[in-house]
Amino acid sequence: MASEKITELEFLLSYDILKQLTGTMERTGCSAADIIEQALRQFLSARKDGNAVYLSAPINALVEGLYVENTTIAEVRQHGDFGLGTFNYLDGEMLLLDGRVYQIRSDGHVYDVGDDERSPFACVTFFSPDTLDDINGDSGVSDLATILDGLIPSPNMLYAIRVDGIFSSVRCRAASRSENYMPLVEATRDQSVFDFHEVRGSLAGFYTPAFMASLNAPGFHLHFLAEDRRRGGHLIDCTIKEARIGIQHVPRLDVGLPVTLDYLTVDLTRDIGEDLEKAEK
Amino acid sequence: MASEKITELEFLLSYDILKQLTGTMERTGCSAADIIEQALRQFLSARKDGNAVYLSAPINALVEGLYVENTTIAEVRQHGDFGLGTFNYLDGEMLLLDGRVYQIRSDGHVYDVGDDERSPFACVTFFSPDTLDDINGDSGVSDLATILDGLIPSPNMLYAIRVDGIFSSVRCRAASRSENYMPLVEATRDQSVFDFHEVRGSLAGFYTPAFMASLNAPGFHLHFLAEDRRRGGHLIDCTIKEARIGIQHVPRLDVGLPVTLDYLTVDLTRDIGEDLEKAEK
């Protein structure tokens, strides 16, 4: 029975995955159909409600100055088409929008990023908003925080947030390429700040519960990209004219732990809350 | 081309998953073969080095007294064949060994657990040790901690730990079925303590870095099950005669966030470290 099915699969699958499949069939006693069905069920549902916020590393490692990790952009994109982060040597701000990865450098320019580039920290998900809300009239960044607070039903959940609209003003920063091991609070003192006016664009980011602060920046964390894809950065301040806010509830957190010697030997016992707050400002 | 392949798949897959598959093909433009291959690659590799420690909920919710969640044992088993946890209403200690789920109740008996039972907290993985070490001669629980400390190369990684051997003595506890909302530190005051002598059995559990303390019990957390599968509990103390220690490095953490009203509205801002330490003793 099983061998019959395998014959049917031979033209469908590469040899290496077929070999793994038959190995798993022998080990578990499950049929090819059972395994494929279970795999498809997980794979297809992961793109819907089984969705996770994926962190390529715990943020406390970044705060301690670990700016060189082995995670490639290709790997990051396996876990999401939306999100933010940074690049090795803290070389600018990362923004992922509709599956494309942008690097906003301290020179003020936005670069397309190849799959082989590497990141010490990225936070991504497959974006599919559960709610859409329109706002009109001038809203400052504190108004935006209040509006977002009102839109998220619980502080204990993760949310992906996308804001598309027209901004009267946006103030952004981009971290400068930095030496490895320089603590984040020092490294971000040397950053570029940009002001944009009357600009159409998108904010992309997350809300993270306070009790996960050692893993991801707690509260709201948003990066901006102009519609022309030529300006952007880590959001410091803004005034929104009109915008559509999409919010996705994400009931899962998925954290990669780097296996670099630096990560394995760094002291992560310090409470990084204060440093992170300073650095994110 | 795609429709040809779908015909071949019709006898393999249930209708609902076939429908999802064709939906995804239309949306992404990928062929059935591509999607199945990607799904199988993820599914089969998740059982190898892509392995995660899966938490069905952050442990701080349990510490605050949330003992009723919707996670079924069937769901827990999708994420591992090895681990520990508890059951709804804190009704005893959970141990997962070789894919079977055991419930050690405060009456001292060990029960087999059905897939429909529910758990407010479980921590599991697919166990496949990276290292095996034998120990001989009397080792107390503090010796065991020292030995395990020596075997784990970094305090910043997650490890699954299995100890099979002969124990001169084991002291275990099992939590008593408790009212929902009673804080863990109070609920575990009412627990049963068992002493076993000259017993063959297994310890199963994890090492968790201190910076993840809001999500999982930090340090070493082990549950015991006798070889006869009739005695066990949360490990308090032991003396090991001889044992084999298997350790698996797990470079990923996967946390489910419950979507129950209780979870979404509970206050999780408190530092639960001290309570957890008391409750785990």
Image (spheres, coloured by chain):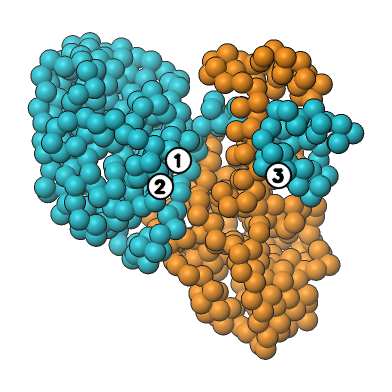
Chain colours: A cyan, B orange
Q: Position of residue B148 (x, y in %)?
A: 55, 74
- Residue B31 placement: quadrant: top right
Residues at circles 1 and 2 in contact by the CB criterion of under 8 Å: yes
Residue holding disc 2: A71
Residue holding disc 3: A20
Residue holding disc 1: A75
State the CA–CA distance, disc 3 to disc 1: 21 Å
Q: Is residue B190 left or right of residue B276?
A: right
Q: Residue at x 45, y 40 (%)?
A: A75
User: Image height check: is A47 above or below B221?
Assistant: above
Q: Residue at x 11, y 31 (%)?
A: A194
Q: Position of residue B27 (x, y in %)?
A: 54, 15
Residues at circles 3 and 2 in contact by the CB criterion of under 8 Å: no
State the CA–CA distance, disc 1 to disc 2: 6 Å
Does residue B138 appear in this view? yes
Chain letter for the residue marked with disc 2 in the picture = A
User: Image height check: is A20 above or below A110?
Assistant: below
Chain letter for the residue marked with disc 1 in the picture = A
Secondary element under disc 1, as helix, strand or loop, is helix
State the CA–CA distance, disc 3 to disc 2: 25 Å
Q: Is residue A130 left or right of residue A145?
A: right
Q: Residues within 10 Å of mark 3 (few under 14, many from 20)?
A: some
Tell me which amino acid carries mark 1: Glu
Chain letter for the residue marked with disc 3 in the picture = A
Q: Position of residue B152 (x, y in %)?
A: 51, 70
Tell me which amino acid carries mark 3: Gln
Residues at circles 3 and 1 in contact by the CB criterion of under 8 Å: no
Q: Residues within 10 Å of mark 2 (few under 14, many from 20)?
A: many
Q: Is residue A255 left or right of residue B234?
A: left
